[in-house]
Structure formats: structure tokens, C-alpha cells
Amino acid sequence: MDLDQPVCLCFRVSRRKLEKFIRLEKPQRAGQLSECFGAGTGCGWCRPFLERLFQEQAEKVGGANAPQDPLVISHDDYVRQRAAYLRDGGGDSPPDTSPDGD
Ligand code: FES
């Protein structure tokens, strides 16, 4: 997934914004990523990805060996899987966003 594509589709929070937030604000747990433009506080689809991104960045800061990219998925697949998640009743999309992230 490219840096400028949204990880949180509900609030259009890009990976770049999240990585910068982690680098500058140094959150202690993944849930604090919600302070970055509300990431993860909509339908909930992106929370596992936020956790992986948080872990990856924490390991980088801690000097551990570079882990695998946590978001190895195309944007199109990511959007498609989230639409299926919402269709299956996995969460509610905020009223001002579409389930496909557009
Ligand atoms: S995609 Fe992040 S809360 Fe819905």
C-alpha cells in the first residue's frame, strides 16, 4: 500500500500521516492511533492494520530488525475487503463516507 493511500478509509487517514504520528507522538499503544484524525474509530475495519503498523513502527524505533511490511496489500484489494467486511455486518461506516472508500 502506498504511503498516501488511506489506511483508515472512514476518515481517509493515510499511512504517511500514521507513520508521522507514531514517529512524532510516540504512542504507547495502538489504540492511541485514534488521536491521528480519528483513525480506527469508524467501522473498525482498519484496526488490525493499525495494530500491525504500530508494531512495525515500534520495532523500528526500538532498533529491532526491520519487520515485514504490515500492509502488503494493494489499495484496491484493501478497499474490496473492507466493503465485504461492512457487507457482512462487521461495522458501521460513518454516515458521510462510502463503504468503498471513495
Ligand atoms: S476504515 Fe478505519 S474505522 Fe473504518
Image (spheres, grey):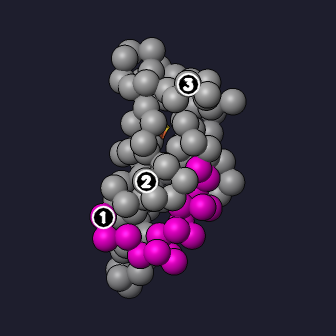
Dot 3 and dot 2 residues touching (CB under 8 Å): no
Q: Is residue 67 visible?
A: no
* Residue marked by disc 2: 34
Residue in the image at 57% along x and 70% along y: 20
Q: CA distance from mark 1 to mark 2?
A: 10 Å
Q: Is mark 3 within 8 Å of ligand 1?
A: no
Question: Which residue is rendered at x = 64% and y = 57% of the image?
Answer: 3
Residue 12 visible in this rendered orientation of the protein: yes
Chain-order first, disc 1 or disc 3: 1
Mark 2 secondary-structure assignment:
helix
Contact flag, marks 1 and 3 (Cβ < 8 Å): no
- Amino acid at dot 3: Pro
Q: Secondary structure at mark 1?
A: loop
Along the horizontal axis of the image, is 95 left or right of 92? right
Residue furthest toward the left?
29
- Residue at horizontal 61 percent and vertical 53 percent from the top: 14
Q: Which mark is residue 95?
A: 3
Task: Report the mark closest to the observer, 1 or 3.
Answer: 3
Q: Is residue 26 magenta?
A: yes
Residue 41: say if magenta: no
- Front residue of 77/89: it is 89
Q: Is residue 48 above or below residue 98?
A: below
User: Label 1 vs label 3: CA separation?
Assistant: 28 Å
Residue 76: image location, x then y, percent: 63, 33
Q: Position of residue 65 (x, y in %)?
A: 38, 77
User: Which residue type carries mark 1?
Assistant: Arg
Asked if residue 19 lies left or right of residue 92, the reply is: right
Secondary structure that dominates the magenta span? helix
Which stretch appears magenta?
13-29
**Mark 2: few, some, or many residues within 10 Å (few <14, many ≥20)?**
some
Q: Is residue 61 above or below residue 101?
A: below
